[in-house]
Image (cartoon, grey):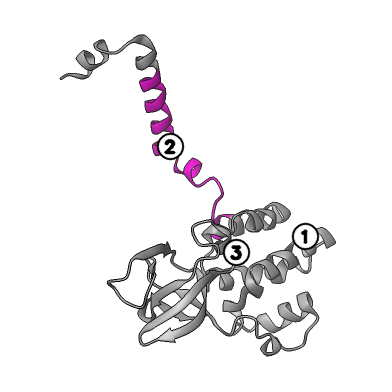
Amino acid sequence: MSIAAYFLTKSNSQVYTLILAMFFFMVLVTHPALIRACGDVDDWIAVYNRGEKYKGLFHMLDCADSYKAPADDVALLPVIQDALKSNSQIAAAAKQVFTYFNHIWGARHEPAYTGVFKAVTGRDNWTSLTDYQDWMVVTAVAGANMREGPSLDSPVITGVKYGMQVKALARHGEWIQARPVGPGSVDPRFERRTGYIHQSLLMTY
């Protein structure tokens, strides 16, 4: 059936509905930014670096679901370092970002980290912070399946995204019993979920 013939079989209201649906589909396809209007950390670092400092920091707090550790931790460190030298409003926002993103723990071995950590927390040594000692990061680019039991035959509970953090609760052979943690875990797909992830898909945070 041709497209013209197909439309002739429909009522006016159905035709209008189809045209409207096609319009919105084309808008989404041609403007991918609308699909991901939140933006990721790189987007908001770019906003910060072009001078819109408070806007960049504010949206980092608003878009945690796309956060990827430890790469985004390292990328954020110079931003936080710079923002702490700015006016009080920007410095306060930087402290919120630092704390919200798990003290950007994945950047702790960078030379600038100790100074930033002390400026935000007032503590001299980041090694005294033990909050993340059992945390791990999903390293599989395609993400990792969290299963009900420590076996490939076990049903999948949910998929955990690349760069997301999980807290290791126990080890069963090659499997880690874990639950999602960090900013991304507030997503209903992950919140309060516990399951098993194969150790080959994880690394220490």
Amino acid on which the number 2 mark rests in the picture? Leu
Against 59, residue 113 (above or below) is below
* Mark found first going from the N terminus, 2 or 3: 2
Type of the residue with mark 3? Pro
Q: Which circle marks residue 90 in the picture? A: 1
Percent position (x, y) of residue 64?
59, 59
Q: Tell me the distance, in whole angstroms, between the alpha carbons under discs 2 and 1.
A: 34 Å
Residue 181 position by quadrant: bottom right
- Magenta segment main secondary structure: helix
Q: Where does label 3 land, which residue? A: 183
* Stretch of the chain drawn in magenta: 17-43
Give the alpha-carbon distance from disc 1 to disc 3, as whole Å.
21 Å
Give the residue at mark 2.
28
Q: Is residue 173 positioned above or below 95 on the image?
A: below
Callout 1: 10 Å neighbours few (<14), some, many (20+)?
many
Q: Residue at x 68, y 69 (%)?
A: 98
